[in-house]
Image (tube, grey):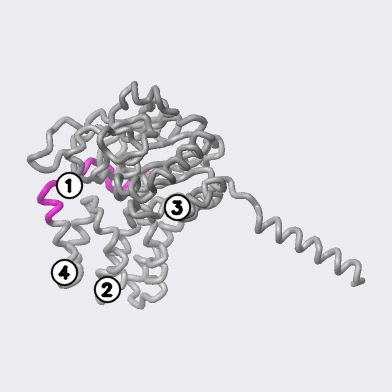
Amino acid sequence: MSKKLIFLFAAILCAFSCTQRTATPALRVGMLDGLGSGHTNMTEAYAAAQLDSRINIRYITSANIAWGVLDSLDVLIIPGGGGSMHTFSLGSTNINIIKKWTENGGGILCICAGAYALSHTPDYACFGMNGAQVVDLDHSSRGQGLCSVALTEEGRKLFPELKDIDTIHLLFENGPMLAPADSAILAESPATEYTPIAVMLSDVHVGAEFQAGISPGKPFFLTNSYGKGRIFTSIGHPEGSASFSWMIPRILFWCAGKEDMALPVEYKAPFLDTEVIMSEQDLEKEGSMYRTFVYGTKEEKLEGINWMMTHPSWSMKTWATGLLYDKDFEVRGAAAAWIASTELLTAKKDLEAAFALEENPIAKAIMQKAVEDINSLYR
């Protein structure tokens, strides 16, 4: 080959390589990693965003925001954790940066504590952006469970895969009860009134101090505009709900004004497709499970995992990966089955590692099926 041809081939190869490396993703997303960001909330939403390979997501901090990182993003996720802590840790300087960026066309997805933070709630440390205010603020630890939720007409347009389904069941964990913000407050803000996308049907009021009848009819999903920007608010956790984590990429494209680019999905009903509100006794039993999983017998651990199969445990998410490496193969296999059934995306790497190490043929077969099920969710 002549030197000219070699040079030309090298130039073409370099140009192709550079193009591949610098190709702009369809969507650029930042996940807020701050004092108000709960680890489980943050990592589950991050993993759900990665279901669509066209989404480039990264963790960002308050320092990154101060240095102008939002200018390189389409959407910001403010996850669950602590609402007032989000406000405190960002401070008025960074909140004003977020507001200006959103007003100029940036998109925000706020989840659970993020919904608290973006509200217009009087006497609460919040941003004042999503057109809603928190009601019954003194009883924020309302409870958790799989709640019955109904999509509105606008919701059926955003999630057409669910247009023929009357009720879906999504994970709720002490999210805010929201109502329209005071009209006088909105009149002085770039925020518009919100549009309900889904409403809560379940009545969540665990404990004698909680009044019944507060949650039914309250918005579970809502959207509004802030200047040129879009905000999607979720009081619950689709990212942690089996068969619904695909909602996160769909929502992110909507927030960026690119909903026409969202990929369709083949909806599969979750294994636990019913309302399950954790009672006080359930929450006490869940709390005792950690000691069972650390010190219990094989039989006790298996009983605990079986109980978790029918109870939407928030804590189990942080324990399941440890059980994949338990000394008893039956426990390892049961943990893998739980991870697959609940579509625990954050356990994917541990599941693959445990499968590679597994020597028992029964547990290995279960783990292989679990790995295949989790990987089938990725596009």
Q: Establish if 120 lies above or below 12.
A: above
Q: Residue at x 80, y 60 (%)?
A: 12
Q: Residue at x 22, y 56 (%)?
A: 308
Lower sequence index among marks 2 and 1: 1
Residue 261 x %, y %: 56, 39
> What residue is pinned by disc 2?
326
* Picture quarter with the N terminus: bottom right
What amino acid type is highlighted by mark number 3?
Leu
Residue 22 x %, y %: 66, 55
Q: Establish if 102 lies above or below 324.
A: above
Tell me the magenta residue range.
269-284
Lower sequence index among marks 1 and 3: 1
Q: Secondary structure at mark 4?
A: helix
Nearer-the-camera pick, 259 or 244? 259
- How far apart, in angstroms, are the residues tagged by discs 4 and 1? 24 Å
Which circle marks residue 278 in the picture?
Answer: 1
Q: Secondary structure at mark 3?
A: loop
Tell me the crowding category of disc 4: few under 14, some 14 to 19, or many 20 or more residues within 10 angstroms, Cα based: few
Q: Nearer the viewer, mark 1 or mark 3?
A: 1
Q: Residue at x 15, y 52 (%)?
A: 283
> What residue is pinned by disc 4?
299
Q: Nearer the viewer, mark 4 or mark 1?
A: 1
Q: Nearer the viewer, mark 2 or mark 1?
A: 1
What amino acid type is highlighted by mark number 2?
Asp
> What residue is pinned by disc 3?
377
Lower sequence index among marks 4 and 1: 1
Lower sequence index among marks 3 and 2: 2
